[in-house]
Amino acid sequence: MTNRLGHVVVTEARRWIGTPYVHQASCLGAGTDCLGLIRGVWRGVYGTEPEEVPAYTNDWSEASDSEVLWQAASRNLVTKELVPEACGDVVLFRMKSGAVAKHLGIVGEIGLEATVIHAFGGHAVVESPFSWPWRRRVVARFAFPDQR
C-alpha cells in the first residue's frame, strides 16, 4: 500500500468517528459495526462494496468455529506480515483465546502515539490508543489494495 492510499484510508475512517454502533449497519453518521466501518471506508475509497455481506449474528462463526471474517478479509484485502505496521492497515482481532477472530479496526497513527479506529458494541466509532491490550489481540494485518 502506498503512503498516499494509507492517508486516504485513514482520512475516510476518521469521517466515521462518532457514528453510533449498530450491529450489521454501515451508514456514515447513522450506525455501523466494525465490519460496516471497513465496508464504509472501502466504499469511500473505491465507490462500491467489496462483496455481498450476508446477515450475521453477534456470535457469527463461533458455532461453526470458522474464521469467516479472516477469510473475507483475505479475499478482498492484501495480507501483510504483523510487522511493520502502517497507517491505514486493517487489523483483525481475536477477542478471546481460542475464539474466532471477529473484530476489525484501521490503524490511524503508528509509533509512540499509535491509534486504532474502530467500532465496538456500546460505543460509537472511536480512535483510541493502540495499546498493549488491543495489540496482543491482533492475529492478522491487511492493507487496502492499491487498485480496485
Image (cartoon, rainbow, N blue to C red):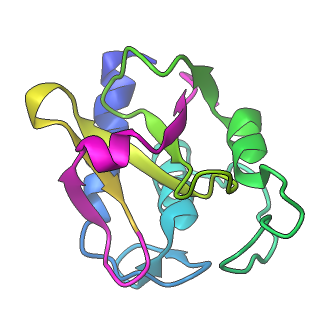
| Residue shown at 10% from the left, 29% from the top | 112
In the rendered image of this protein, does residue 116 appear above or below residue 65?
above
The foreground one among 98 and 61 is 98
Q: Which quarter of the picture shows residue 79?
A: top right
In the rendered image of this protein, does residue 144 appear above or below residue 84?
below
- Residue 22 coordinates in the image, percent (x, y): 49, 84
The foreground one among 29 and 74 is 74
- Residue 104 coordinates in the image, percent (x, y): 50, 52
- Residue 102 coordinates in the image, percent (x, y): 61, 58
Residue 97 located within the stretch drawn in magenta: no
In the rendered image of this protein, does residue 49 appear above or below residue 24?
above
Residue 143 located within the stretch drawn in magenta: yes
| Residue shown at 46% from the left, 18% from the top | 1
Q: Quadrant of the C terminus?
A: top right
Q: Is residue 12 visible?
A: no
Magenta span covers which residues?
Answer: 120-148
Q: Is residue 45 visible?
A: yes
In the current view of this chain or complex, which residue is farthest to the front? 97
In the current view of this chain or complex, which residue is farthest to the left? 112
- Residue 62 coordinates in the image, percent (x, y): 78, 66
From the viewer's perspective, tell me whether residue 126 is left or right of residue 25. left
| Residue shown at 56% from the left, 82% from the top | 23
| Residue shown at 50% from the left, 72% from the top | 33
What is the tally of numbered marks visible in this picture?
0
The foreground one among 60 and 47 is 60
In the current view of this chain or complex, which residue is farthest to the right? 64
In the rendered image of this protein, does residue 58 appear above or below residue 131?
below
From the viewer's perspective, tell me whether residue 26 is left or right of residue 125. right
